[in-house]
Amino acid sequence: MAKTERKRSVATGSKRLPTEVSKAVAAALDKKATDVVVLDLRNTPAFTDCFVLCSGQSQRQVKAIADGVEEALRAAGARPNHVEGYDRAEWVLLDFFSFIVHVFTPQMRTFYSLERLWGDAERIEMTEP
């Protein structure tokens, strides 16, 4: 399937994705996150169902995106089990057990290249509806 055919909006993708993942994506987009991608790991031998990957253009925006995701999910009754990287704000990881949100600066996202490492996962590019 061509890359352009696999793009889904939050509204379309939310039919397939767990509700909490869709809420995390919507919260990230609300904070102007860029390159928002969900890696659906449910058909892989991964330790979680999904990765939400997104980028902020500065450390301040990375923190704002992470805060927005955490706030939106907290309102829905979900709290992260673990948070890493918030102080440095170059790569913030929010672990919600069944999915993990990764918020990167562009440089760190390129360096770690999680999309490449988890190449077996279905890649769902998220855009605003």
Image: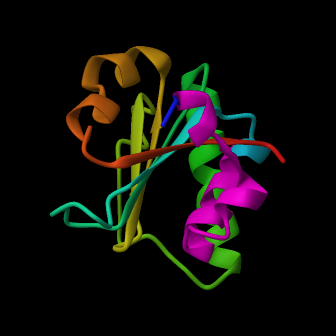
Report the residue that reaches farthest toward the right: 129
Residue 2: give x, y in percent of width and height. Answer: 52, 30
What is the magenta segment's predominant secondary structure?
helix
| Depth check, front residue: 68 or 110 | 110
Report the residue that reaches farthest toward the bottom: 77
**Vertical relation: 114 (above or below) 84:** above
Q: Which residues are magenta?
A: 3-28
Residue 99: give x, y in percent of width and height. Answer: 40, 65
Quadrant of residue 11 in the image? bottom right
| Depth check, front residue: 96 or 11 | 11
Which residue is painted at 73% across and 58% down in the image?
Answer: 12
Quadrant of residue 61 in the image? top right
Left or right of residue 57, residue 80 in this image? left
**Vertical relation: 47 (above or below) 64:** below
Which residue is painted at 64% across and 53% down in the image?
Answer: 25
Residue 8 included in the magenta stretch of the image: yes
Residue 126: give x, y in percent of width and height. Answer: 64, 43
Which residue is painted at 34% across and 73% down in the image?
Answer: 97
**Vertical relation: 77 (above or below) 95:** below
Left or right of residue 121, residue 45 in this image? left
Quadrant of residue 46 in the image? bottom left
Which residue is painted at 30% across and 26% down in the image?
Answer: 113
Residue 85: give x, y in percent of width and height. Answer: 35, 42
| Depth check, front residue: 112 or 92 | 112
Residue 51 included in the magenta stretch of the image: no
